[in-house]
Amino acid sequence: GLFGVPELSCPEGFQEAQDKALQESEQLVQKACSTPPGPETVMIFDQLSDALCRVADLADFVKIAHPDFAFREAAEEACRNIGTMVEKLNTDVELCQSLRRLLADEVVMSSLDPETRRVAELFMFDFEISGIHLDEEKRKKAVNLNVRILDLCNEFLTGAHLPNKIDKHVLPEHIQYHFTAEGNYLQVAGLHADCPDDLVREAAYKIFLYPNAEQLSRLEELLASRNSLAQLVGYDTFAHRALQGTMAKNPETVTQFLEKLSDQLSKRSQKDFEMMTRMKMKLNPQNSKLMPWDHPYYSGVLRAERYNIDPGLYCPFFSLGACMEGLNSLFSKLLGISLYAEQTQRGEVWSEDVRKLAVVHETEGLLGYIYCDFFQRPDKPHQDCHFTVRGGRLRENGEYQLPVVVLMLSLPHSTRGAPTLLSPGMMENLFHEMGHAMHSMLGRTRYQHVTGTRCPTDFAEVPSILMEYFANDYRVVNQFARHYKTGEPLPKNMVSRLCESKKVCAAADMQLQVFYAALDQIYHGKHPLKKSTTEILKETQEKLYGLPYVPNTAWQLRFSHLVGYGAKYYSYLMSRAVASMVWKQCFAQDPFDRAMGERYRREMLAHGGGKEPILMVQGMLQKSPSVEDFVDALVSDLDQDFETFIMDS
């Protein structure tokens, strides 16, 4: 069966696994309601969460990644049914009362350890988000809003990726072939950001981002519904609700962080835009005004011109085998952990090129399993991601339930003459996703509700971004980057040039991220919104980006992250700031420092989401960072490395 779950040897098994989970959860609900307040209450709640997540998490992965449609469909159905059960439990008054009795009992609460207390509070937070504390009429309203929001999210996501059509005669003939023809129409399915023809990018931008009335009303209803739900359950705005328990804690801190970062970036990003403008003048003298569709293209041109980092020069040094050896050696030195390939049983994996790795600690033994689904195949989503399939937890019998995760990438297959070769970007992504996997393996919490990466969004990306710093350090790369034919190491100046090339126009790129994050905060801030979403876009773009708004476009209707990261788009920037500080302070001097590796595990990875994120950061840095510290960390990463500059000159 898939992942060794016997029921899942065929698609119908999802029904069986789901029925088992629902049956188990009903027994646990009865047990929770009849248990006197104490640590056992939290244990039962966590068992309940585990019973449902064991099916839901696995199904979440299978529904998007399994090549067999029947499996995908069965998994989708299981997700829906478990989701309905979770909604039902979140509004079960009697179940909530059993937890409330525990939280109200000061004597028992003071006897609990901090992790158990935090988990109890997190479960209560889930109840309150569903409006459990409201009267019946308002509770019903909250349930209906939750359902409506889910539907709107799905509809908005679909709409965000739909192509726009235009009469083909509108476009000059010489650029029509860039777009898919459909009768008399051309389909524009994206921004064509890398196309060297300015006119193609301009046309794609104006057509793909042309406002769609249905999508606009979906977005407006989604934002209004999120706000209504947040206010119904007692928050000022949806952003206040979404940021509870995060590192930032509240929208005011996020806004302060983004404004200060923008101030620090403005001179640098202005310089970047001036460089891009000069490059555009050189290549296209008739029309040299820099527009939003130019930014990704001309920053790429500048990068290539200044550093000549053709991925083809690097790929031969980054065979998949060499990169995995590099990760193994790094984890072994830093954390005493090794990765071993394991034989899989029949039916355990969904494609024969999936590999299973056992993660083993030198003294603690087996920590968990990573399934590596690394290669391209038809219908496989083109996104690099990490999935928790089973969370770790301490079982009732004293054994530890081992975590199971999947890493999904889209690497090319090996050919007869060469192994799988990774571009520098693919290598960095592999390290990034492995950072998530190690968090899952080492976040060995007592409760699966807070295991591994089940932590606030603005902390979850810290371990993965930190791995990118390792992937860009010559001392680390030099351990494994060897030419697959000759065995020669990757020259140091090639690594330095690669790192420096990433700083070209990096301030302008970061400025764009600040603009997106600020837009997300305003949309999820005070309602009713002062202006239309498009007017807010125009105003925020002019204030925080530096390139003009283009009339009759509505980029926000393609902003699919508003669904999964509503009010939390800033998280990536904040996680990067923390990762940067951890790297500079703890690992830049010696990336293989075992004592630092152990401190990193003890202070940051071991707690999963069972400890307040800012306390984990304080434990690691041994000081409490301010908003200014976050901003300084991000901005100092943009500085050019003097040694490389001299070498290149």
Image (cartoon, rainbow, N blue to C red):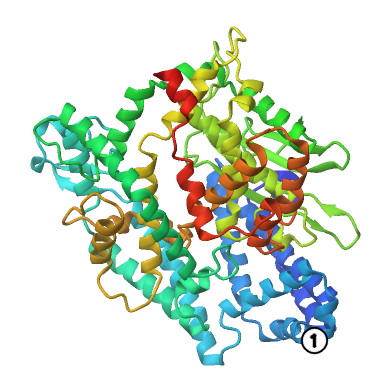
The residue sitting at 76% across, 32% down in the picture is: 333
- Front residue of 147/336: it is 336
On the question of residue 430 being in view, the answer is yes
Residue 186 showing in the rendered view: no
Residue drawn at 19 percent across, 48 percent down: 206
Is 393 above or below relative to 576? below
Residue at 42 percent across and 54 percent down: it is 261
Local secondary structure at mark 1: loop
Q: Residue at x 85, y 60 (%)?
A: 395
Q: What residue type is labelled 1?
A: Asp
Determine which quarter of the picture holds residue 280. top left
Q: Where is residue 82 in the image (x, y as percent from the top left)?
A: 62, 65
Question: Would you name the residue on which mark 1 appears?
Answer: 105
**225 above or below 354?**
below
Q: Which of 477 and 133 is in front in this view?
A: 477
Compare residues 480 and 92 and report the one nearer the observer.
480
Q: Tell me: 562 left or right of 278.
A: right
Residue 410 rendering spot, x and y as whole percentages: 51, 34
Q: Whole-percent x and y of residue 357?
A: 73, 35
Residue 332 position (above or below residue 442): above
